[in-house]
Amino acid sequence: MLELIQVSKRFGATTALEPTSLTFERDATTVLIGPSGCGKSTLLRIAIGLVEPDAGAVRLDGTRLEPSTARALRRRMGYVIQEGGLFPHLTARDNVTLMARHIGRSARDVGTRLEELCALTRFPADGLERFPAELSGGQRQRVGLMRALMLDPDVLLLDEPLGALDPMIRAELQDDLRDVFRERGKTVVLVTHDMGEAAFLGDRVVLFRAGRIVQSGTARELLHSPAEPFVAEFVRAQRSILEDYR
């Protein structure tokens, strides 16, 4: 569904991403993981066209992402960032429906879709008229997810969507996200630094270090068959998953 072909990126003298190729399969969740500054978020932004690579190409369902195709392809991708990235002056309802209204979807269709998304994400209907500052962190994340799902995209890109939440809310949303991914059959690319979250949500885990992929596989494969000492050190530092995946 989504393919990155030898994409690379530098910011001044800093190499954010070495030439990297990745294929993201339909109906599967791929988790990009690694320490801060390793290139995973840069790769995600390249995938949706927010950052232009210095070299390489991005293809969605066979079509190359470039200026002439960017608008149409972005509508097939939903993007969620930490804290939801909501517009503070818009209500939850207006945040979720903004793009659908912008492209001329009927009020009836928008309303029907909004009801479906509230049920899917377990967001309370009486919260739709609240502004982001009036919502909890977990509710803001649900609004961000609903906004990303509003146009029923083929691909979901999530950049540390649960990173700022307390452990209990984070665990609850992890359960909800996994249910959404399975029910909707989306191609999902999720960035995190938490190995336990990667193991829980991902069909495949891709570990980055210093702008390059060091290993790709299941959580068990990274634990039991590390490709290099850094992989073993990274997994060992994530103590919460060791017992579950031994």
Image: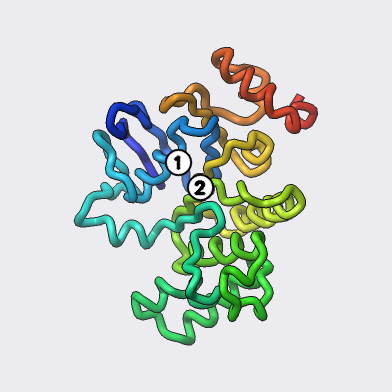
Residue 50, image x and y in percent?
34, 50
Within 10 Å of disc 1 (Cα), the crowding (few <14, some 14-19, many 20+) is many
Q: Determine whether label 2 and label 1 are within 8 Å by CB.
A: yes
Instruction: Name the residue furthest right.
Output: 243
Q: Which numbered circle lies on residue 41?
A: 1
| Horizontal relation, residue 60 to residue 96: left or right | left
On screen, residue 64 above or below 115: above
Residue 240, image x and y in percent?
75, 32
On screen, residue 67 above or below 218: below
Which residue was labeled with disc 2?
A: 159
| Horizontal relation, residue 159 to residue 53: left or right | right
Nearer the observer, 116 or 44: 44
Quadrant containing the C terminus is top right
Query: Tag 2: residue type?
Result: Asp
Q: Which numbered circle lies on residue 185?
A: none
Residue 74, image x and y in percent?
35, 58
Residue at x 46% of width, y 26% of height = 213
